[in-house]
Image (cartoon, grey):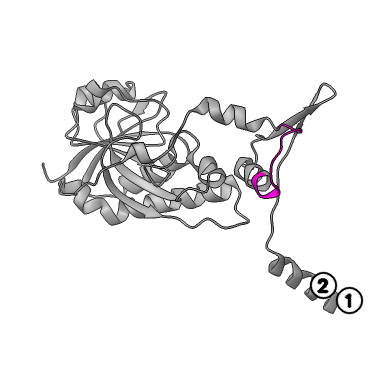
Amino acid sequence: MGEKVQTILLRDGAVGDRVEPWLRSKDDVNLITATSKKSEDNRHGSSPTSGLEAVSEHKPDLLLSAGYRHIIPNDILEEADMALNCHNSYLPYSRGANSNVWSIIEEEPVGVTIHEMVENVDAGPIVAQRHVPLYPDDSGKDLYSRLIDATVGLLEDEWELIRDGTYETKENSIEQGTHHRSEEFDELCELDLQAETTVKETIDKLRALTFPPFKNAYFKRNGKKYYVDIDIQEADNIDEKIQSAREDE
């Protein structure tokens, strides 16, 4: 591998927004970025092409996926010396879509993973992982933001090994983990008002689906649809504010 790592970043969403500027700040990277819609090659001056076409054209040292919304075909993965994905769960748990939501609902280990990409989704050998804390007052958005921070931090810590291709991997035991499709999220959003459940399960479901400004959880009654969010606040923080307000009266 040369002095600079020829890197193609396939990116979408908030995690891509964070990873791209971090990579652009690296002096040891020649970077081409691509979203689901188009690619932009600011270093080489080539005209925009689709992300997958860019991989075939440039045959990069590193193909890195960060929030990319499409499954990358195996023949494209083989064009790169290394093909890695940043996934916002602690694999093998919560493979697939909406990992921040399922990590809350299913009480699985929470974290982020960098793994080698293979034909099956989120099934490749694990390069590095980091646990992320989950708090009782977290919403799905709170956890998602913390997962993005952890992803960038993990990339920073592991970058030299990734750049040099000297990282070691461990098995991704997918038979012991879980997997969710995007269609399952859609089904999750509709609340069954007659369902037998616990208060904890209901709270966890509502907080996992709370992701402002988006509206996710809803129920239907009398032909109308109603959205539901939840706001959980630690009592000590509220009690301190109430006490302070009383003292100021």
Q: Residue at x 57, y 44 (%)?
A: 105
Tell me residue 86's x, y (percent): 35, 41
Instruction: Specify the principal SS of the magenta part.
Output: loop
- Rendered view: 75 above or below 118: above
On the picture, is 32 further left or further right than 81? right
On the picture, is 85 further left or further right than 199? left
Give the quadrant of residue 153.
Answer: bottom left
- Secondary structure beneath label 1: loop
Tell me residue 246's x, y (percent): 85, 75
Q: Which mark is residue 245?
A: 2
Stretch in magenta: 192-201
Extreme residue in the bottom direction: 247
- Rendered view: 85 above or below 58: below
Is the C-beta separation of discs 1 and 2 under 8 Å? yes
Can residue 198 be found in the magenta stretch? yes
- Rendered view: 232 above or below 174: below
Residue position for label 1:
249
